[in-house]
Image: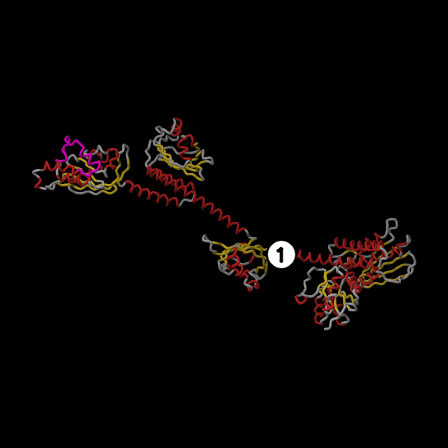
């Protein structure tokens, strides 16, 4: 799969149940020039959004209104869509399959978010910037 | 010899020096004796058989004597001399009957037998002799053989003899000690051992009293534990002060030496008062006393007392010391056994009573060999079914497959102990979290003979720990999410503020709204918060006492789940802030009414909340939506899956919110 050259213009689906947290993430993503899709606040709505496939990557909260986000992660992995886990847990209990996935801790830091997005999504030679 | 008979006289004289040559002390005595007054006459004229016999005994190193003629004149050699004690050398050439007068009744018949021509042999014959001025028990083995003249008539006896007193005493002592040891071995109480010992010794020594006393801590007073008496001397009871019996003997005893008193009234080591104390002590004249020192201090004595003066023999001293030693050894053995039994019993009680601990032993290869009640309770196996099984059955199947049981034995063998915390399997298949240790058991040479394992069921502790960890993780998660929310509020408040003052006010009031919601949830243990409490607390912050009640809340009791409570609280806060700035609460005449109702049949619109303003300035729809408005709209729809309608009626803002059933705590 061809990787994009820069973050600007990338469409990111935000899967996050708490609106305040979703809103700050939107703000940060927009500041990076990304287009925000969603946010989706539940496993079912996130799975519906994946069927649309109108985004480049996903930021996925591990817990969605008391449900584990694993089905969403599985679907994304099956579709080959890049995604980043987000959680308030310092070490979320993820299945072995996703243990090496990039992981974003709450509260968010713009610089860290940008770094993880670049590492995960961009062409390797563009990551240095 | 017959051809010499003519010159018998002269040759005999010549021979006398040869005859007595090398005859030792007795030989000299014979030569120097004035024989003229004796019936035998001078040695040179002695008959040939006598000369030969004398020559024979004088040249022998074995104790021998010659008894000659009708007077039974007694000759002996140097080896025989000690037998005579104080009677040597006066006994030489005296009648045998006079020399051994005190035992003549016993030995006379043997002499007669030998004189009649028949040799005698006696072995270990007991004779009480007074050779040293006092009676002595002695034992003898001897033979009398006839010496005949040329006609065959018995003219004398050869006495070949040895004193066997030492041998006999030794054998008797050994027999006595064996019998004593045999009886002591069967005793199980110190007092019984003492009773056995003093009675046996008392009877054996034929003393008046024989006893055993123990000392106080300072070694000053002695208490008689028990004494045996011959029925004539009185028994002792109570305490005696050792020093009262004489400082010299007391000091001897304290330094571990035997004290022998032959006669208290004649002993120079005792003064009159000491001697009186001895006599007052049951008429005691003679005593023999053996001390027993423990850690350098006088701990006990064993004694023999006599109402008459008594010359204690070396043998009696040896006997008393031997009995005392054996008695002390027995008492110490009993104490040690008692202590061991007490300690074994204590350990048995501990192991048995420790039913909250599984305690068991295994062999080197892990076969279970002991099993206490705690183990039975913990694992569910009883003794018969678990003994001799490998202790691996107590492990979970995974640990068994991983070879943990054997590995643990190896570690305990190598390091002496191994500590472990793991899941164990009960007989019924259930598991418990066991915490404990295994120790290797070693024999005297240091080689491992088996293992001891002690375990505790710490399942509750383990679960509590897991629960705590879960709570900590949950709390951390919640705190991080809250921080993210605050971060969001701060960021977006700042973007919608035109001055720092405005930011400060808006941010602080939003933060306080969040804090209020958290307070209410904390009171409700984070299960939920009451809607009325939320609404009234928020409204209160926007109305003072003078104007109250400008805001009224009405509705049935409803409890919202935590995130609904936080969000509704923020929404009410935003609405109230807006009302205070631009709406009904910005005018003294304005008022707000918040009301809610439940629609039991409607899952999606279970709760309806209506915010209604009146009496304020004329309302116009805002041209742009600020953070507050966005938060309200998106929060209700996105986070709570509810609906929100805002009607900017000119007479007052109206906001209607519908929340689905899942946002309400059902157990209300």
Q: Give the range drawn in magenta.
A: B20-44
Picture quadrant of residue B140: top left
User: Can residue B331 be seen by looking at this rendering?
Assistant: yes
Near-viewer residue (B72 or B178) = B72
Instruction: State the image coordinates of residue B542 (x, y, percent, origin top left).
Output: 85, 53
Report which residue position mark 1 lands on: B462
Instruction: State the image coordinates of residue B192 (x, y, percent, origin top left).
Output: 41, 41
- Left/right placement of residue B590 relative to residue A111 reads right
User: Can residue B601 be seen by looking at this rendering?
Assistant: no
Q: In which quarter of the image is the C terminus of chain B?
A: bottom right
Picture quadrant of residue B180: top left
Is B328 drawn above or below residue B380 in the view shown? above
Q: In which quarter of the image is the N terminus of chain B?
A: top left
Instruction: State the image coordinates of residue B189 (x, y, percent, origin top left).
Output: 43, 43
Near-viewer residue (B345 or B65) = B65
Residue lying furthest bottom: A1
Answer few, some or many: residues within 10 Å of disc 1's Cα (few below 14, many 20 plus, some between 14 and 19).
some
State which chain disc 1 sits on. Answer: B
| Magenta-drawn stretch, dominant element (helix, strand or loop) | helix
- Left/right placement of residue B374 relative to residue B511 reads left
User: Is residue A90 found inside the magenta-colored segment of the image?
Assistant: no
Is B361 drawn above or below residue A125 in the view shown? above
């Amino acid at each position: 799969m061809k990787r994009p050259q820069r973050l600007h213009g990338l469409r990111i689906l935000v899967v996050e149940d708490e609106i305040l947290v979703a809103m700050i993430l939107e703000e940060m993503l927009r500041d990076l020039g990304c287009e925000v899709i969603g946010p989706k606040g539940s496993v079912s709505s996130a799975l519906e959004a994946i069927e649309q496939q109108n985004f480049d990557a996903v930021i996925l909260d591990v817990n969605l209104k008391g449900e584990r986000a694993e089905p969403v992660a599985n679907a994304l992995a099956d579709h080959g869509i890049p995604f980043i886990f987000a959680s308030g847990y310092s070490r979320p209990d993820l299945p072995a399959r996703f243990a090496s996935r990039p992981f974003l801790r709450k509260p968010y830091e713009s610089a860290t978010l940008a770094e993880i997005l670049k590492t995960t999504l961009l062409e390797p030679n563009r990551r240095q910037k | 010899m017959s051809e010499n008979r003519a010159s018998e006289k002269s040759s005999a004289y010549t021979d006398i020096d040869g005859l007595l040559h090398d005859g030792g002390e007795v030989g000299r005595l014979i030569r120097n004796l004035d024989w003229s007054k004796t019936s035998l006459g001078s040695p040179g004229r002695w008959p040939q058989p006598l000369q030969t016999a004398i020559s024979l005994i004088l040249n022998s190193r074995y104790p021998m004597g010659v008894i000659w003629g009708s007077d039974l004149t007694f000759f002996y050699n140097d080896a025989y001399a000690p037998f005579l004690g104080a009677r040597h050398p006066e006994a030489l050439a005296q009648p045998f009957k006079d020399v051994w007068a005190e035992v003549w009744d016993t030995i006379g018949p043997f002499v007669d037998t030998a004189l009649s021509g028949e040799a005698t042999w006696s072995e270990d014959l007991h004779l009480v002799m007074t050779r040293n001025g006092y009676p002595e028990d002695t034992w003898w083995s001897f033979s009398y053989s006839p010496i005949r003249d040329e006609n065959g008539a018995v003219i004398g006896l050869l006495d070949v003899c040895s004193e066997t007193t030492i041998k006999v005493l030794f054998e008797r002592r050994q027999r006595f000690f064996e019998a004593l040891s045999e009886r002591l071995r069967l005793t199980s109480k110190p007092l019984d051992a003492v009773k056995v010992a003093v009675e046996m010794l008392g009877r054996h020594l034929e003393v008046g009293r024989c006893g055993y006393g123990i000392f106080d801590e300072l070694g000053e007073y002695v208490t008689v534990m028990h004494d045996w008496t011959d029925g004539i001397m009185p028994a002792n009871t109570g305490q005696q002060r050792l020093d009262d019996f004489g400082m010299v003997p007391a000091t001897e005893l304290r330094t571990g030496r035997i004290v022998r008193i032959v006669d208290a009234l004649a002993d120079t080591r005792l003064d009159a008062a000491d001697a009186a104390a001895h006599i007052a002590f049951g008429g005691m004249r003679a005593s023999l006393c053996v001390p027993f020192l423990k850690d350098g201090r006088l701990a006990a004595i064993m004694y023999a007392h006599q109402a008459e003066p008594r010359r204690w023999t070396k043998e009696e001293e040896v006997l008393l010391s031997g009995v005392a030693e054996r008695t002390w050894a027995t008492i110490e053995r009993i104490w040690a056994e008692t202590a061991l039994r007490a300690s074994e019993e204590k350990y048995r009680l501990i192991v048995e009573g420790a039913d909250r601990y599984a305690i068991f032993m295994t062999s080197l290869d892990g076969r279970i060999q002991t099993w206490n009640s705690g183990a039975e309770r913990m694992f569910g196996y009883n003794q018969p079914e678990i003994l001799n099984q490998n202790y691996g059955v107590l492990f979970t199947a995974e640990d068994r497959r991983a070879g943990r049981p054997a590995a643990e034995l190896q570690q305990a063998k190598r390091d002496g102990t191994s500590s472990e915390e793991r899941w164990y399997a009960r007989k019924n298949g259930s598991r418990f979290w066991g915490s404990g240790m295994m120790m290797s058991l070693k024999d005297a040479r240091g080689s491992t003979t088996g293992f001891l394992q002690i375990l505790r069921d710490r399942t509750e502790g383990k679960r509590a720990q897991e629960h705590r960890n879960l709570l900590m993780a949950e709390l951390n998660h919640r705190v991080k999410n809250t921080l993210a929310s605050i971060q969001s509020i701060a960021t977006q408040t700042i973007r919608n503020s035109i001055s720092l003052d405005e930011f400060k006010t808006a941010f602080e009031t939003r933060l306080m709204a969040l804090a209020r919601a958290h307070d209410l949830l904390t009171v409700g243990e984070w299960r939920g918060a009451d809607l009325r409490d939320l609404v009234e607390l928020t409204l209160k912050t926007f109305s003072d006492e003078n104007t109250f009640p400008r805001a009224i809340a009405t509705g049935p009791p409803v409890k919202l789940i935590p995130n609904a409570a936080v969000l509704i609280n923020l929404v009410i806060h935003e609405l109230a802030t807006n009302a205070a700035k631009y709406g009904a609460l910005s005018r003294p005449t304005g008022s707000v009414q918040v009301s809610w109702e439940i629609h039991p049949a409607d899952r999606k619109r279970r709760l309806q909340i209506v915010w209604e303003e009146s009496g304020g300035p004329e309302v116009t729809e805002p041209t742009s939506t600020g953070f507050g408005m966005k938060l309200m709209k998106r929060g209700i729809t996105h986070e709570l899956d509810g609906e929100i309608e805002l009607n900017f009626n000119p007479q007052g803002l109206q906001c209607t919110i519908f929340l689905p059933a899942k946002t309400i705590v059902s157990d209300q």
